[in-house]
Amino acid sequence: QVQLVESGGGLVQAGGSLRLSCAASGRSYNAMGWYRQAPGKQRELVASITNGLMTNYADSVKGRFTVSRDNAKNTVYLQMSSLKPEDTAVYYCNAGMWRSGKYVSFDYWGRGTQVTVSS
């Protein structure tokens, strides 16, 4: 099992930046992901990263978000820049694996951190 705790959310103006952190304790997984869920919408995968530091991004955030991890600290980060109002959502950290060229989530989630981008 793994416990995931997100932090770093907040209110920011459009064009601003935020960095989210996800501290993991317990078993480590070879891939971690960041999801987000806006009101009335399904949860969507935003970015993922493997232990080997291979990354993948949703088209909507490519060039603006950067996922990274510090394996020694068992922490995953999501650097978000050029934020837009449509990035407003609760952001969740997830533990999973990389299989057949895509990220597969396990049912391990943090409680989420709210990101609100004002126009």
Image: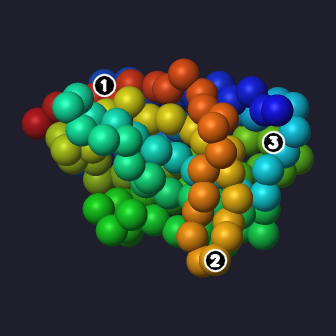
Measure the C-alpha gap from mark 3 to mark 2.
Answer: 24 Å
Please name the amino acid that badge 3 sits on: Asn
Residue 103 horizontal side relative to residue 1, left or right:
left
Residue name at image x 58 percent, y 63 percent: 103
Q: Which residue is mark 1?
A: 11
Which-is-in-front pick, marks 3 and 2?
A: 2
Disc ID at residue 100: 2
* Res. 14 in view: no
Find residue 42 and report its horizontal and vertical position in percent.
30, 41
Q: Which numbered disc, 3 or 2, marks the residue that appears first in the sequence?
A: 3
Please name the amino acid that badge 1 sits on: Leu
Instruction: Using a 10 Å C-alpha cutoff, classify the residue at mark 2 as few (fewer than 14 neighbours), some (14 to 19) or many (20 or more).
Output: few
Disc ID at residue 33: none
Whether pointer 3 and pointer 2 mark residues with C-beta atoms closer than 8 Å, the reply is no
Find residue 2 and report its horizontal and vertical position in percent.
78, 32
Whether pointer 1 and pointer 2 mark residues with C-beta atoms closer than 8 Å, the reply is no
Q: Which residue is mark 3?
A: 74
Element type where label 1 sits in the image: strand
| 92 to 29, vertically: above or below | above
For the C terminus, the image quarter is top left
Residue 77 horizontal side relative to residue 84, left or right:
right
Please name the amino acid that badge 2 sits on: Ser
